Image (tube, helix red, strand yellow):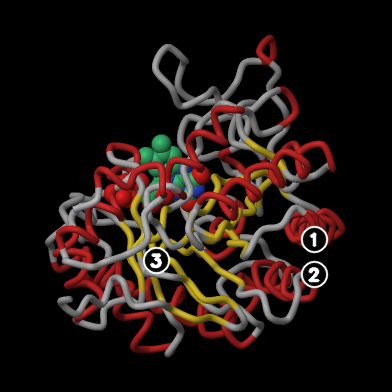
Amino acid sequence: MAYSYLFQPLTLRGLEFKNRAFVAPMCQYSAADDGIPTDWHLMHLGSFATGGFGLIIAEASGVVPEGRISPGDLGLWNDDQAREFAHIADFVHTHGQGAKFGIQLAHAGRKASTYHALPGYPEGSLSPEDGAWTTLAPTDEPFGPFDAPRAMTESEILETAQAFADAARRAVDAGVDTVQIHAAHGYLLHEFLQKDVNTRDDRWGGTDLENRMRFPLEVVRRVREAIPDDMPLMLRVSAVDWKEEAGTEAAREANDADLADITEFVRQAAAAGVDMVDVSSGGNLPQPQVRPVPGYQTEFAAHIRRETGLPTSAVGIITDAVQAEHVIATGQADAVSLAREALRDPRWALRAAQELRQDIEWPDQFYRAKR
Ligand code: FNR
């Protein structure tokens, strides 16, 4: 059997992932009323579990109702939601040949209260007739054409950090193997980190990075305390915001500045108990100057891994087995996360194992397809 980096197990704290092919969180805009997972989510996440992936992370799930992107998002602020997550966790554990299950805990900040991002829905903020709610953010500056948020008070900041911890505890009770804190894509935690967005003049923001990190690090600390010691804690960051035209010197400078801040944040998050970081990009600008090409974000994962020593996963147009193998073999990341390619082929990891000549376990029901 040929050697494969992708199919080497990875251990974080007390948890072993059978391989390094992970599924990134993907909103399905298919929740029942009140953020409850449905059969769609069981099918969506279950298909990845039976498709050979080592870790499947459920979509951004609001830690409070107003933290959802849209009314179709999942939530984890009550026990009815947790019960349905438990059903999915059971499925993954029963049928996933050792696959692990995680949940991304999220608050959409000033990018909340939108329509479902699906064909047939308008773009942008919900209208009042469609149930718009007041969004919360570091300041009252809107995101592009979205409705303006309200700047959070100090007590709202602390309550929100606690809501992350409460949701994490519910996730643990539901049987997840790990939780991922969403600090990427221009949602609340990333809004606090980005200096152009978080222009507060108190200890939670402004020009001082320590102040801008205070809330996201508070979230990390509280979530870490809420989950068992042997459970790994994941984090997702946006390394850069693509402020200048990709490929230019100006872009390099702007990206380097963002990357320096985020690298420092990851370093401190690791000290506060994060075990792995998934490195994405973008989200704070309505029109980022990015040209997505295969592997366009792996250099950021590599930088953060090198500078902080924290295990990373790389994401962004990673679509084939050899490419995934290369990312890990060259030390850019410890794992890869796939989103759209996993939607196209939920059995991607089984196929990758064949391509890389790895004799892994398949679901018995599929054995006739195994070569
Ligand atoms: C996403 N993405 C995403 N990211 C995240 O952190 N939380 C989420 O809930 C979602 N939701 C979501 C839905 C859908 C349908 C897509 C396609 C994407 C971003 C995703 O996890 C990933 O970072 C990007 O899609 C880039 O990876 P790929 O698609 O090039 O493998």
Q: Earlier in the sequence, mark 3 or mark 2?
A: 2
The percent coordinates of residue 7 (x first, y second) are 31, 71
Using the image, determine if residue 141 lies above or below residue 192. Answer: above
Mark 1, ligand 1, within 8 Å: the answer is no
Labelled pair 1, 3 in contact (Cβ < 8 Å): no
Residue at the image position 16 percent from the left and 55 percent from the top: 294
Residue at the image position 51 percent from the left and 40 percent from the top: 143
Name the residue beneath numbered marker 3.
Answer: 279
Could you tell me the amino acid type at mark 1?
Arg
The percent coordinates of residue 208 (x first, y second) are 58, 77
Name the residue beneath numbered marker 2.
Answer: 226
Mark 3, ligand 1, within 8 Å: the answer is no
Q: Earlier in the sequence, mark 1 or mark 3?
A: 1
Disc 2 packing (10 Å; few <14; some 14–19; many ≥20): some
Name the residue beneath numbered marker 1.
Answer: 169
Q: Quadrant of residue 148?
A: top right
Alpha-carbon distance for marks 3 and 2?
Answer: 24 Å
Using the image, determine if residue 20 lies above or below residue 307. Answer: above
Labelled pair 1, 2 in contact (Cβ < 8 Å): yes
Alpha-carbon distance for marks 1 and 3?
Answer: 25 Å
Residue at the image position 66 percent from the left and 34 percent from the top: 37
Looking at the image, residue 264 sits to the left or right of residue 156; the answer is left
**Secondary structure found at label 2:** helix
The mark closer to the camera, 1 or 3, is 1
Q: Can residue 288 be seen from the camera position used here?
A: no
Using the image, determine if residue 34 lies above or below residue 330. Answer: above
Looking at the image, residue 289 sits to the left or right of residue 336; the answer is left
Disc 1 packing (10 Å; few <14; some 14–19; many ≥20): many
**Secondary structure found at label 3:** strand
